[in-house]
C-alpha cells in the first residue's frame, strides 16, 4: 500500500520519539539562526511601535530610492527609511518624530522628486509615547494569552503537557520573529494579530495530539511504554494534522504570494507572512517538538519507569522461551544459566573422581 493510503488509514508506524534527536537538532539550529538574526538585524518595527512620521506619495515620475535619498539629503535629512511600494508606483518615507516645520520640508522634498503636488501626500504621525503604549499593549496581550493557555492545559490535561505545548509555542514565536528579521518586513499591529492567531493554531494542534495520548494511555495502561503510546497517538492523528495544515496554508499562501507579490497588495504582506510561517512552524512543532518532548519528560516518572522495567523483563522472558523452543526443535537440550543457589545450569553433572587411598 502506498504512503498516502497508509496515512489516510492511520496505518503509518513513524518513530517520532525514537528520532527525537534529529528533530531537536533541527529545531535548535533554526532557533539559533533566528536569535542570531534578531541580535544582528533586529526587527523592522513600524511607526506604530516606535513613533515617528510616515509620508507616502504616488510616484508618476518613477523616482528610485537613490533619488529620494538625494532629495532628503538636500534638506539635511540622513538615515530616513525610504521604500518603493506598489511595485514602484509609490514612495514611502519613514522618519523619527518631526516638528511641523521639518515635516513640511520632508513632504515638499518627497513630493517634488515624485512629481506630485504637496497636498497629494499622505502623512501619518505617531508620537513616541503612543508607540510605546502600543508596544506594551501587544506584549501584555501575549503574556496574558500564554498564562491563560498554560492554566487551561494544566487543568484539562497535566502540567507536563502544558510545558511541552509552551515550549513548542516559544519555538514558533522565535522562528517567526527570525523570519521577519531576515526578510526585513515591517512589524505592524496587524502582525501582532497574526501572531496571536498562529499561536492559537499551534496550541490547537498540540492539544489534539495530547488528547489522543491520554486516550491511548487509558486504553493500554501499563502494556506499552510512554514512547510507544506517543508514537501510536502521533501516527493516528498525523493525517488530521497534515490536512488541517494544508487547508490553512493554501489560502494563506495565496494571500501572501498572489495577493501581495503578484497583485501588489503590499499591506497584506506583513499579515500573511506571519500566518504562513507561523502555521508551518506550528504544524512542525506540534509533531516533532511538543510530542517527543512530552514522551521524554513523562518517561522520567516512576510509573513509566516501572512499566519500562516490566516490559524489559517480559521481553527477556519471551526471548528465553523462544530460544528454548528453537533449541528443542533442533533436538538440543536447553541450557539454563545458574542464577542462584539451588538452581542448575542444565549441564550434565560428572561423577566425582575417586581418590586413591595412600597406604
Image: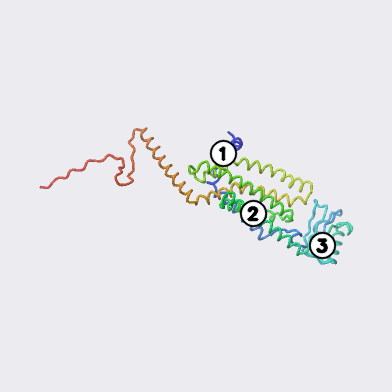
* Residue 198 image offset from top left, x and y in percent: 68, 50
Front of the two marks 1 and 3: 1
**Circles 3, 2 touching at the beta carbon (< 8 Å):** no
Numbered circle sitting on residue 70: 3
* Residue 170 image offset from top left, x and y in percent: 62, 54
N-term-proximal mark, 3 vs 2: 3
Q: Is residue 124 left or right of residue 296?
A: right
Q: What residue sits right under mark 2 in the picture?
A: 148
Task: Report the front residue among 162 and 250.
Answer: 162
Front of the two marks 3 and 2: 2
The Cα–Cα distance between marks 3 and 2, rounded to whole angstroms, is 51 Å
N-term-proximal mark, 1 vs 3: 1
The Cα–Cα distance between marks 1 and 3, rounded to whole angstroms, is 62 Å
N-term-proximal mark, 1 vs 2: 1
* Residue 312 image offset from top left, x and y in percent: 44, 45
* Residue 187 image offset from top left, x and y in percent: 73, 56
Q: What residue sits right under mark 1 in the picture?
A: 12
Numbered circle sitting on residue 36: none
Amino acid at each position: 500500500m502506498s504512503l498516502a493510503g497508509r496515512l489516510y488509514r492511520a496505518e503509518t508506524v513513524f518513530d517520532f520519539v525514537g528520532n527525537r534527536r534529529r528533530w531537536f537538532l533541527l529545531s535548535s539550529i533554526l532557533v539559533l539562526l533566528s536569535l542570531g538574526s534578531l541580535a544582528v538585524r533586529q526587527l523592522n518595527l513600524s511607526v506604530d511601535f516606535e513613533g515617528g512620521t510616515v509620508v507616502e506619495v504616488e510616484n508618476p515620475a518613477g523616482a528610485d530610492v537613490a533619488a529620494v535619498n538625494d532629495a532628503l539629503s538636500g534638506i539635511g535629512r540622513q538615515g530616513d527609511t525610504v521604500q518603493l511600494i506598489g511595485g514602484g508606483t509609490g514612495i514611502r518615507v519613514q522618519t523619527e518624530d518631526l516638528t511641523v516645520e521639518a515635516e513640511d520640508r520632508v513632504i515638499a522634498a518627497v513630493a517634488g522628486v515624485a512629481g506630485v503636488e504637496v497636498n497629494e501626500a499622505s502623512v501619518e504621525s505617531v508620537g513616541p509615547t503612543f508607540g510605546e503604549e502600543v508596544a506594551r499593549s501587544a506584549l501584555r496581550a501575549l503574556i496574558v494569552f500564554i498564562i491563560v493557555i498554560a492554566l487551561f492545559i494544566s487543568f484539562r490535561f497535566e502540567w507536563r503537557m502544558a510545558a511541552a505545548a509552551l515550549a513548542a509555542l516559544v519555538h514558533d514565536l522565535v522562528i517567526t520573529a527570525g523570519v521577519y528579521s531576515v526578510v526585513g518586513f515591517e512589524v505592524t499591529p496587524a502582525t501582532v494579530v497574526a501572531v496571536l492567531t498562529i499561536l492559537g493554531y499551534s496550541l490547537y494542534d498540540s492539544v489534539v495530539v495530547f488528547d489522543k495520548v491520554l486516550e491511548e494511555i487509558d486504553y493500554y495502561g501499563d502494556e506499552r511504554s510512554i514512547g510507544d503510546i506517543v508514537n501510536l497517538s502521533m501516527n493516528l492523528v498525523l493525517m488530521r494534522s497534515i490536512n488541517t495544515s494544508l487547508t490553512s496554508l493554501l489560502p494563506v499562501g495565496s494571500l501572501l504570494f498572489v495577493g501581495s507579490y503578484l497583485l501588489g497588495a503590499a499591506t497584506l504582506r506583513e499579515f500573511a507572512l506571519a500566518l504562513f510561517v507561523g502555521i508551518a512552524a506550528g504544524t512542525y512543532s506540534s509533531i516533532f517538538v511538543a510530542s517527543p518532548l512530552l514522551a521524554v519528560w513523562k518517561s522520567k516518572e516512576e510509573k513509566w519507569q516501572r512499566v519500562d522495567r516490566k516490559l524489559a523483563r517480559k521481553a527477556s522472558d519471551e526471548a528465553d522461551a523462544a530460544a528454548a523452543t528453537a533449541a528443542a526443535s533442533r533436538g538440543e537440550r536447553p541450557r539454563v544459566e545458574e542464577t542462584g543457589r539451588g538452581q542448575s545450569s542444565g549441564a550434565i553433572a560428572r561423577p566425582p573422581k575417586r581418590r586413591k587411598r595412600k597406604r
